[in-house]
Amino acid sequence: MTRLAVRPLPVEGESLTGYLFRLGMLNCVFRPSEIMDVLGVGKSSHVVKGWCQPACDYLFDALETRLERPVRPYLRQFERQDDLPWQRDWTRLIQDVRTGYPRICTQCVAETGILDWRWGLAFTSTCPKHASLLTAECPGCKKALTPSGTLLLGCDKCEMDWAEFEAPMASEMSDLELQLWAQLEQDPSNVDPTVIQDLCRAIVYMMRPFDSLHDTLEAAPRLIEHSAYVARAYRTLQEPEFFAQWRKQCHEKRKDLMPLGEEFLEAPCQLFRDGLLNDWSGPARGSSIPLDSIALGDELSENTRYIAQPRREAAFESGEGVGYRYQLDIASIASIKGWSEEVTEDLVGNGVFPTFKNVAQSKKRRFDANQIIGKLRQFAVQTADGFIEVDADSSAFRRNFANPGMLVNDILKKVIPGGFGEDKFLSRIFVHESRFAKWLLQQRKSATRRSVPLNKVAVALDCTEQDVRRLVEEQKLKWATHREWEKWIDGPSLFEYMICLD
């Protein structure tokens, strides 16, 4: 085995992949596979996760052998970088925050010849030393950076050294990112995971700023403009005016959804704000700024790379994925309307709205909002004799074990005469007054044919669960005998009691 001519030690803050590239470059070996062969760890270990080499014992053993001295103490920083508690989280929108491709500050590389490990985090955007966006492409030829030892010298495509390029235009760096860089330098294990979760949410939403659905991704996909989107994510969290501009652009971009109501127009902003774990000045204050006082600003771009492959549909691929703006699922409809998912299940049940590319009974089934509008428009009405407008929060629903989703569904199935106001289809529900009373009674009969959970009985009677227990003691209601392990009320006894109350 040829002895390495140059055997450098790792530098504080250097990434493991960067160190391997530097070791190879100094010994005139540039390709990742060749570097691993020189270390004698075999082809099975060549560059995991795109370009990031994981810290592991067999690699450290190989490094000690080839460097011909004890280096374990110097390598521990790589183990710490690879085992941070917030690095992977299966509950956030970007589960693994390590990028699978190189992003660098060309000035830093020209000055130090080092690749900083923090450049490989999906939530960093800007070099704090030079205030320039991290780049994933050569500033000269605009081609993607190659993960190899040449990265430490310059572009392997146009053969320009990083030192030859003029300094890129400085970018304004947010206070939040500056704080994160400081924490990552002092004690990276102590970074607040909820902040990382909110940042990942902001990044994904800024990739699809007018979309109602946002997919969970295993990792951030390779994207040349990633740093610019991340910088925009910081602005979304911290600048009320920027958040307000986003809201206004949602109204403009999603104006086709006007018949469903204003909440559907600004659903991306609402869903984003409701899903945050921390209080941020941007979403909190930006939502209260009047829309007519806002200048539109630069148009936010959209990127289909942040739509998971299973959700993609050829018929919806147009431009930057404009069709995806109108996709909804049960959870998003519920969140936008402020309904429970149970109510939304009743709304879309029995196939009243067409679904696409998924199982009709699946809770993950998706709908096109424009198709929903088309279906509701067939039942558009204005006030007429014998028809009343039903409030979605009406106590009549609760008292009869019904909900507005069930009513809309039955109107669409023509079980009951009714329709929807032309300005707000799902907020203005009209129904024949006398038929509505019969419909409510039918829902009550249907619900009380069997036993009813104690909590639902309390809601229907507008009382506490303790009050319901007292009614059982007074023999006005009965316990369901076949559910001895949990408290349910006998349905027929409940129906008779409610008839007496009427």
Image: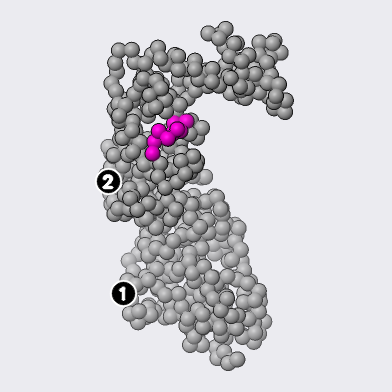
CB under 8 Å between callouts 2 and 1?
A: no
Identify the secondary structure beneath mark 2.
Answer: loop
Residue at image location 65% in from the left, 18% down from the top: 490
- 348 magenta-colored: yes
Q: Between residue 388 and residue 178, name the one nearer to us.
A: 388
Residue 258 image offset from top left, x and y in percent = 30, 35
Residue at image location 39% in from the left, 36% down from the top: 353
Q: Quadrant of residue 240?
A: top left
Question: How many residues crowd around disc 1 within 10 Å: few (fewer than 14), some, or many (20 or more)?
Answer: few
- 186 magenta-colored: no
Residue 310 image offset from top left, x and y in percent = 44, 53
Which of the image's four quarters has the N terminus?
Answer: bottom right
Give the residue pinned by disc 2: 296
Q: Between residue 437 and residue 212, name the one nearer to us.
A: 437
- Give the side of residue 206 with respect to residue 489, left or right: left
Residue 166 image offset from top left, x and y in percent = 32, 74
Which range of residues does the magenta coloring cover? 346-354
Q: Quadrant of residue 81?
A: bottom right
Q: Amino acid at mark 1?
A: Cys
Closer to the observer: label 2 or label 1?
A: 1
Residue 412 image offset from top left, x and y in percent = 38, 27
Asked if 81 appears above or below 236 in the picture, the reply is: below
Residue at image location 36% in from the left, 55% down from the top: 303
User: By what rule are the colours in the image chosen?
Assistant: one colour
Q: Which mark is residue 141?
A: 1
Q: Quadrant of residue 42?
A: bottom right
Identify the secondary structure beneath mark 1.
Answer: loop
Q: Amino acid at mark 2?
A: Leu
- Give the side of residue 467 with respect to residue 354, left or right: right
